Amino acid sequence: MKNITLLGATGSIGKSTLSVVDQHRDKFNIFALSANTSWEKMAQLCHRYQPKFAVMMDENAASQLQSALDNDTIVLSGEQALCDIAAHEQTDYVMAAIVGAVGMSSALAAAKAGKRIMLANKESLVLAGDIFMDTVKNSGAELIPVDSEHSAIFQCLQSGRSGLSKIQLTASGGPFLHTPLSELQSITPDEACAHPNWSMGRKISVDSATMMNKGLEVIEAYYLFNLKPEQIDVVMHPQSIVHSSVYYKDGSTLSQLGNPDMRSVISYAMAYPRRISAGVAPLDLASNPPLEFYSPDLDKFACLKLAFDALKQGGNAMGTINAANEVAVDAFLKQTINFLDIALVIEQTLEQTKHAVLNSLDAIIANDQTARELATQIVAKYA
Ligand code: NAD
Ligand code: MG
């Protein structure tokens, strides 16, 4: 029996993780759950899974949850409590599925404590890739990606990386793949969040629509698989069936395929190196529509280009674009700025930030804060 700490239990990845746990209650036990403010949803989860700990980021939500519960679950609040349940000696696996930079400290705490980290929070690697990977190495933690593309690469690399020439991340292109650039200015948040293949939280859905999600994934792959930027390629694949590929020097390409359902990825991370059922329908290639692939349009999807630029610049550039993106997406979801302004806010934040090498977590956090303040000022110009 493996004890699981599920960070971000009320989100999309959280829900899919619980669905896999439901199918294997003999193998996995929910040890701790966390959420931001939604205490009512958390109360239902506590009732169902009887975790030892429930952490609400928000203090008021924690008090509400405490009064709603009549079991032995210990209710805590705040970022330190998130780190504590991630590093707790009784937990084995930590699903890091909080959205945004705020998920970094708890994911790092799991890494420091030598846990199996099932990493959905890609922002952790974008902000602190070097420190994160060093921590994993030094503590003996296991890092298993919970991002469909990176899980695909991880699975393909099980046969080794001898002769690896490059990896290729597939990108669906989101809801606006075929929408002309001239029509993107008037897109609403609900239109941006209507992803054709995947059902996800609102922030990552907007990131998919701008393709910043793919940009963040390029950086995630750079750290996870220790590659050079020029070894990472992106190809458009609207059907989201081929999840990503590894190219070898001998002309071979290995790809991982499946229906777009995160439960495949999550169950793989939970059962690795074995495989267990996940409730996902098997792929039926013969009845699928034709699989299409083509090169991304970097003029239309400026965010993807900005992420490649930031990776090449290195240093604080990656943390800066991540922070600016979070501020810009939040402003777009609140209808303060337009869809196309997101890329402009990120571009200008990057331009106006002095290049620096960040050697400590404190410096990374300070850069994140400064970039957020600058991006907020730039957002105000577009509001
Ligand atoms: P979501 O918005 O559905 O859920 C986010 C979770 O984080 C919720 O449980 C919420 O309570 C918690 N949270 C939000 N703000 C918080 C805060 N300030 N403090 C503490 N907790 C907070 O998001 P999601 O789609 O599940 O995505 C989660 C992460 O997984 C993201 O980093 C995303 O990039 C990554 N990811 C998601 C998918 C997917 O299919 N949804 C796929 C690949 C990677
Ligand atoms: Mg992905």
Image: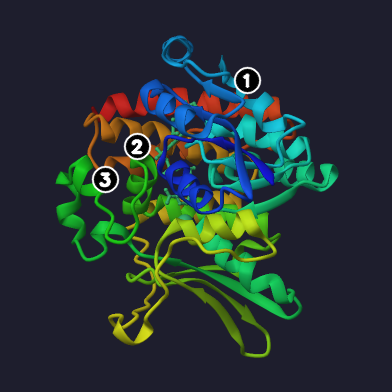
Rendered position, 376 above or below 298: above
Could you tell me which secondary element the residue under label 1 belongs to?
helix
Circle on res. 94: none
Q: Which residue is mark 1?
A: 81
Callout 2–callout 3 Cβ contact below 8 Å? no
Residue occupying image coordinates x 18% and y 61%: 180
Real-space Cα separation, disc 2 to disc 1, in angstroms? 27 Å
Say what amino acid the circle numbered 2 marks.
Val
Nearer to us in this view, 66 or 232 = 66
> Quick one: label 2, few (<14), some, or many (20+) residues within 10 Å?
many
Real-space Cα separation, disc 1 to disc 3, in angstroms? 38 Å
Residue 55 lies in what quarter of the image? top right
Q: Which residue is mark 2?
A: 329
Rendered position, 251 above or below 54: below
Q: Nearer the viewer, mark 2 or mark 3?
A: 2
Measuring from the top left, give residue 92's x and y in whole percent.
Answer: 71, 41
Could you tell me which secondary element the residue under label 3 belongs to?
loop
> Quick one: label 1, few (<14), some, or many (20+) residues within 10 Å?
some
Residue occupying image coordinates x 82% and y 47%: 140
Say what amino acid the circle numbered 1 marks.
Ala
